[in-house]
Image: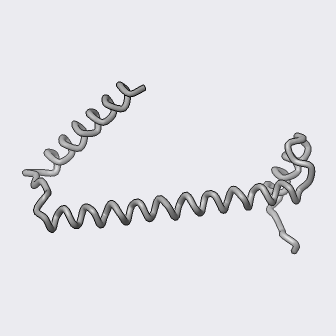
């Protein structure tokens, strides 16, 4: 298989080999593809988690578990307040 790279990508591959981290351009490309597979799997998991959270939220709405806000500002204030509470709780754990 032949692959054509932009001059910038070709230089990056050559730099990686020259650094001694990789013994060949093929090794650099295999590592890049392995990382792409990991990235794709991470993205797939994140999308799945998001879908699950959307589904859970929709179910909560069906059950009447939601808050109505008087204005967009009230919503933003509540989001900010809960975010600060979560941050403080996280900081206490560490």
- Above or below: residue 48 compared with residue 35: below
Please indicate whether residue 74 sits to the left or right of residue 49 in the image: left
- Above or below: residue 77 compared with residue 25: above
Farthest-out residue, bottom = 1
Which quadrant of the view contains residue 42?
bottom right
Q: Position of residue 49 (x, y in %)?
A: 41, 60
Q: Quadrant of the C terminus?
A: top left
Please indicate whether residue 56 sits to the left or right of residue 21 in the image: left
Query: How many numbered marks appear?
Result: 0
Q: Nearer the viewer, residue 14 or 63?
A: 63
Residue that appears at 16% across and 51% down: 72
Please indicate whether residue 66 sits to the left or right of residue 2 in the image: left
Q: Nearer the viewer, residue 6 or 84?
A: 84
- Above or below: residue 1 compared with residue 93: below
- Above or below: residue 17 compared with residue 81: below
Q: Position of residue 62 (x, y in %)?
A: 15, 68
Q: Nearer the viewer, residue 29 or 75?
A: 29
Q: Position of residue 43 (x, y in %)?
A: 53, 60
Residue that appears at 84% across and 70% down: 3
Residue that appears at 85% across and 42% down: 21
Which quadrant of the view contains residue 29?
bottom right
Residue that appears at 13% across and 64% down: 63
Please indicate whether residue 59 sits to the left or right of residue 20 in the image: left
What's the colour scheme? one colour
Q: Quadrant of the N terminus?
A: bottom right
């Amino acid at each position: 298989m032949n692959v054509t790279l932009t001059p910038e990508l070709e230089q990056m591959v050559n730099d990686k080999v020259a650094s001694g981290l990789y013994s060949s351009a093929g090794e650099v490309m295999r590592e890049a593809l392995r990382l792409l597979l990991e990235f794709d799997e991470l993205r797939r998991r994140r999308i799945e988690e998001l879908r699950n959270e959307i589904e859970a939220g929709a179910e909560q709405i069906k059950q009447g578990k939601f808050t109505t806000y008087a204005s967009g500002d009230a919503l933003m204030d509540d989001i900010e307040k809960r975010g600060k509470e979560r941050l403080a709780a996280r900081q206490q754990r560490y």
